[in-house]
Amino acid sequence: MPKHFLMCRPDHFTVAYAINPWMDPEAGADRDVAIRQWEGLKAVYESLGHQVSLIEPVEGLPDMVFAANGALVAGGRVYGARFAFPERGPEGPAYLRWFTERGYPSLEASHVNEGEGDFLTLDEVILAGTGFRTDTAAHQEAQEFLGRPVVTLRLVDPRFYHLDTALFPLDGRNVAYYPAAFSEGSRQVLRRMFPEAVLASAADAEVLGLNAVSDGTNIVINSEAGDLQLELKRRGYEVHPVELSELRKAGGGPKCCTLEIRGEN
C-alpha cells in the first residue's frame, strides 16, 4: 500500500554544533551535496508510488531535515515531539503546527521525546527507545494518547542514540536490528518478540544501515550497508540503496529524513 511521508528539504542544513557522536562542527557539511542526496531519497519514494508532503524549513534549525524526530503519527493522531537539546527545541512546535493546521488531533507532549526517532510503529505495538533522548514517561504518555501498547527498549551505545538508528520495522510484524545497541534485558525482549528478525552486523550498523524505511516490500537503505542489503534480498525484499553520506555527518539516514503519516485525518 502506498504510504504518506512528511519531509523537510535541507535548505538550512549544516553541522554547527555537536549533540551526538556523529557531529563534528569543525568538519562541517556541504549543504548543496546534502540537498542533492535528499532530493534523490525523495525521488525514490515517489518512484515507488508513495506520497511525499513537505514542511517549510526554518532558518536556524539545521536539523529540521530530520523529519522523523518531529512527531509520532498513528491512526491519524499526532503525538508531538519535545526535544532533549535546546538547539532543536523549536522543531517540535513547528512540526506540531503543520499537523494542527491540517486538522489532525494532536497532543503537545509533556515529556521529552524525539518522535519517530524513538517510536517505531508495528501492527500491534509501538517500540519505544530510551537511554539517551526520550524519557520513559513519554512512552506512557504516547500509549495513553494513541491507545496502542508501547514496549520500552533501552539503548546503551551513544552512537545509536535513537531507536531508529539501531532498528527498523521490516513490515508490521518483524524487524531488523543491531543487538549490541541494546541492553541485555531489551535484547531478550527483542528475541522473544521477533524470533525471525534480521540481525545486522556492527559494520552495517556503523554506517546507519538500520536507519532504513520499508513499505513491507521495498526497503530504502543507506548504500554502504552491503551485507544487510544481501540478507534483505535473501528474505525476498526489494532493496533500494541511497547515498546520504552528507546527512550522516549529523547522524541521519533515510529514516531520519522521513516521518510517516499513518492514518489520515
Image (cartoon, rainbow, N blue to C red):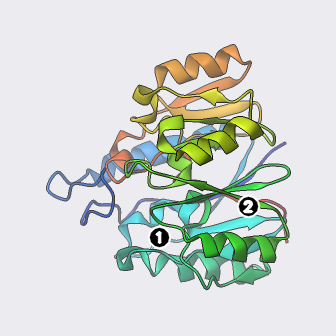
Return the residue at label 1.
57
Other-residue count near label 1 (Cα within 10 Å), few / some / many at <14 / 14–19 / ≥20? many
Q: Look at label 1 and name its amino acid.
A: Pro
State the CA–CA distance, disc 2 to disc 1: 18 Å
Image coordinates for residue 43, horizontal then vertical, percent: 58, 42
Secondary structure, mark 2, is: loop
Q: In front: 65, or 230?
A: 230
Q: Is residue 122 visible?
A: yes
Return the residue at label 2.
261
- The answer to whether the residues at label 2 and label 1 have Cβ atoms under 8 Å apart is no
Secondary structure, mark 1, is: loop
- What residue is at 50 percent from the left and 40 percent from the top? 40
- What residue is at 81 percent from the left and 39 percent from the top? 173
Taking 264 as reference, is 119 left or right? left
Please tell me whether residue 1 is drawn above or below residue 131 in the rendered image: above
Q: In front: 10, or 15?
A: 15
Please tell me whether residue 173 is drawn above or below residue 58 in the rendered image: above
Quadrant containing the N terminus in the rendered view: top right
